[in-house]
Amino acid sequence: MLKISVNSRIIPFFRRLKVSTSKRLAIDIFKGVKKLTPVDTGRAKRGWRMLRRRFGMIVINNVPYINYLDQGSSKKAPRGMTKPTLERLNTRNRVR
């Protein structure tokens, strides 16, 4: 299972986010990791879910091998999905 919690405490430079901004960030992370997920059967890509929680949003994938894919085991996504997504969002938004 891979779980990304998006709230005001996710990463130090995201601490000042408002609720609407953290929701937008969760949506952007969800779209980014889903887009970068390599496809063989499509199971890993279909496994992405976004859940609302009391203190934020959670992007989750319960496919058993998702951690291996995120560590770069696929030739289609050698850098994984989460790291490139977060790097892209950081450079795009320059959140401080």
Image (spheres, rainbow, N blue to C red):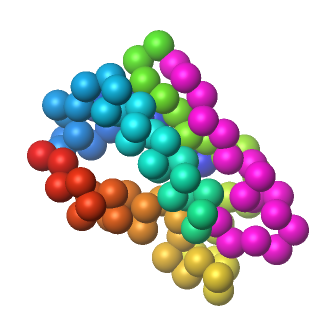
Give the left or right position of residue 63, taking residue 1 as reference.
right
Can you name the residue that lies furthest to the bottom here? 75
Q: Residue 41 location, x and y as percent?
A: 87, 68
Point out the residue furthest to the right here.
41
Q: Is residue 6 left or right of residue 47?
A: left
The reply to whether residue 85 is visible in this rendering is yes
Q: Is residue 32 left or right of residue 34?
A: left
Query: Looking at the image, which residue is at 32% across and 38% down?
Result: 10
Q: Name, please, the residue furthest toward the top.
A: 54
Identity of the residue drawn at 24% across and 64% down: 91
Please indicate, yes or no, whether residue 4 appears anywhere in the rendered image: no
The part of the chain drawn in magenta is 37-53
Q: Is residue 81 above or below residue 62?
A: below
Task: Look at 45% across and 48% down and name the residue there.
Answer: 28
Residue 42, position in %: x, y? 82, 63
Q: Where is residue 46 drawn, in percent x and y?
A: 77, 52
